[in-house]
Image (cartoon, grey):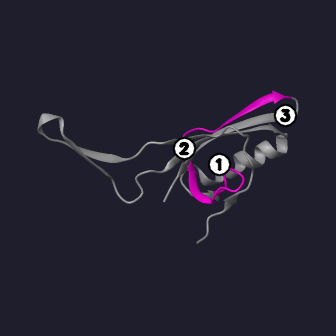
């Protein structure tokens, strides 16, 4: 089954974080052996903002996230020329009513294998 594609373009300035998932086994004299857990131990966590959106666009973006509920994956291209990867939303997503008819939506995408 093919995941739906999230096609909205985020603002510039997306923040990408990687927290490698590792196992560490300490031995004597300060020696520690480290290794990645599994084959996908370095997945991206990306903080995104979609600002200056109309009420309709903000509702479309939020509706897309609501349909997946943080569980069902989707595909997205984060920046121009970047590869399409699979994500889920992580934690809360927020909508700010900046002014009449202008909204900002913020969300965190967690890459999934």
Q: CA distance from mark 1 to mark 2?
A: 12 Å
- Residue 104, numbered circle: none
- Residue 108 is left or right of residue 10, and the answer is left
Residue most toward the bottom? 1
Image position, residue 102 (x, y; %): 84, 34
SS at mark 3?
strand
- Residue 90, numbered circle: 2
Q: Residues within 10 Å of mark 1 (few under 14, many from 20)?
A: few
**What residue lies at 69% left-to-right and 50% top-to-bottom?**
79
The residue tagged 1 is 66
Image position, residue 90 (x, y; %): 54, 44
- Residue 56 is left or right of residue 1, and the answer is right
Write the start and end of the magenta stretch as one range: 76-99
SS at mark 1?
helix
The N terminus - image quarter: bottom right
| Vertical placement of residue 92 versus 40, above or below | above
The residue tagged 3 is 102
* Residue nearest the viewer, comparing 29 with 109: 29
Q: Residues within 10 Å of mark 3 (few under 14, many from 20)?
A: some
SS at mark 2?
loop
| Vertical placement of residue 98 versus 11, above or below | above
């Amino acid at each position: 089954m093919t995941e739906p594609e999230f096609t909205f373009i985020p603002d510039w300035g997306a923040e990408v974080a990687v927290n490698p998932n590792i196992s560490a086994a300490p031995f004597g004299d300060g020696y520690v052996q480290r290794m990645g857990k599994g084959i996908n131990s370095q997945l991206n966590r990306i903080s995104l903002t979609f600002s200056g959106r109309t009420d309709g666009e903000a509702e479309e973006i939020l509706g897309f996230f609501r349909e997946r509920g943080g569980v069902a994956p989707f595909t997205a291209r984060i920046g121009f020329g970047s590869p399409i990867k699979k994500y889920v939303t992580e934690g809360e997503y927020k909508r700010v009513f900046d002014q009449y008819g202008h909204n900002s939506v913020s969300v965190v995408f967690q890459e999934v294998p």
